[in-house]
Image (cartoon, helix red, strand yellow):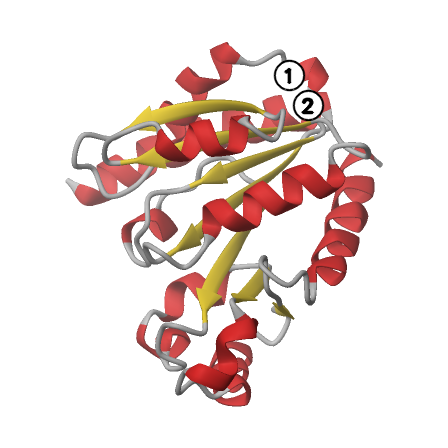
Amino acid sequence: MIRNVLEANDKMAVQLKGLFARHGILVLNMISSPGAGKTSVLERTLADLRGEFRMAVIEGDLQTDNDARRVAATGAKAVQINTDGGCHLDSNMILEALSNFDLAEIDILFIENVGNLVCPVEFDCGEDHKVALLSVTEGDDKPEKYPLLFNLSKVMLLNKVDLLPYVDFDVERAKRFATHLNKELTIFPMSCRSGEGLEGWYDWLRTARAAKRG
């Protein structure tokens, strides 16, 4: 049954990839544990780069539209998907949400997935890249415990580094676990609060967007 669900999802994801490619939209699937800071990263990114890119967000949550309202306050178009208990977004949900957008007016589409390090990884949403977000308030062994996410992601954002003096988190250990799984993984230590490390993330976005546009 699970295999059938994933196969159906993958077929829809292929259609989405074609749709996004025709419009030159860079699509990023943001995945993390609850509370790691996905929404805060998006708020800061959307605010700082709104003069460069036309950006939109699909927000996935079990309930409420709190996060969608937060990102919409930056001026970006945001659409909320409530899964009503579901642990992930899938390609069909993304397709339905796209009816709320004019794709000709989007350069970068962020998918903020449901807070979960397992289920969202298995469902392709038509994205160009998965982005793993880990915070220093979590364990530095998360990449080792949840290997599939870090193996499949293009980028790992290591958030909340301003809190390193106050938490027991070994940055080099986390990097070592992650790059052992994926030698091509790009890691950006960063802090939404202080702004540290954000420019590296922004430069990566600029490069990825340029590559998608051709």
**Residue pictured at 39% horizontal, 87% vertical:** 168
Q: Which mark is residue 106?
A: 2
Q: Is residue 145 left or right of residue 163?
A: left
Q: From the viewer's perspective, is 31 left or right of 190?
A: left
Residue 181 visible in the picture: no
The amino acid on which the numbered mark 1 sits, given as a three-letter code, is Leu
Q: Which residue is mark 1?
A: 103
Residue under the point 76% across and 59% down: 199
Q: Quadrant of the C terminus?
A: top right
- Residue 79, relative to residue 121: is it above or below? above
In the displayed structure, 193 sits above or below 6; it is below
- Indicate the secondary structure of the residue bearing disc 1: helix
Residue 7: image location, x then y, percent:
32, 37
Could you tell me if residue 199 is visible in this image?
A: yes
Residue under the image location 41 percent in, 59 percent down = 36
49 sits to left or right of 74: right
Instruction: Using a 10 Å C-alpha cutoff, classify the residue at mark 2 as few (fewer than 14 neighbours), some (14 to 19) or many (20 or more).
Output: many
State the image quarter where residue 183 is shown: bottom right
Asked whether the residues under the numbered discs 2 and 1 touch, taking CB atoms below 8 Å apart as contact, a structural biologist would say yes
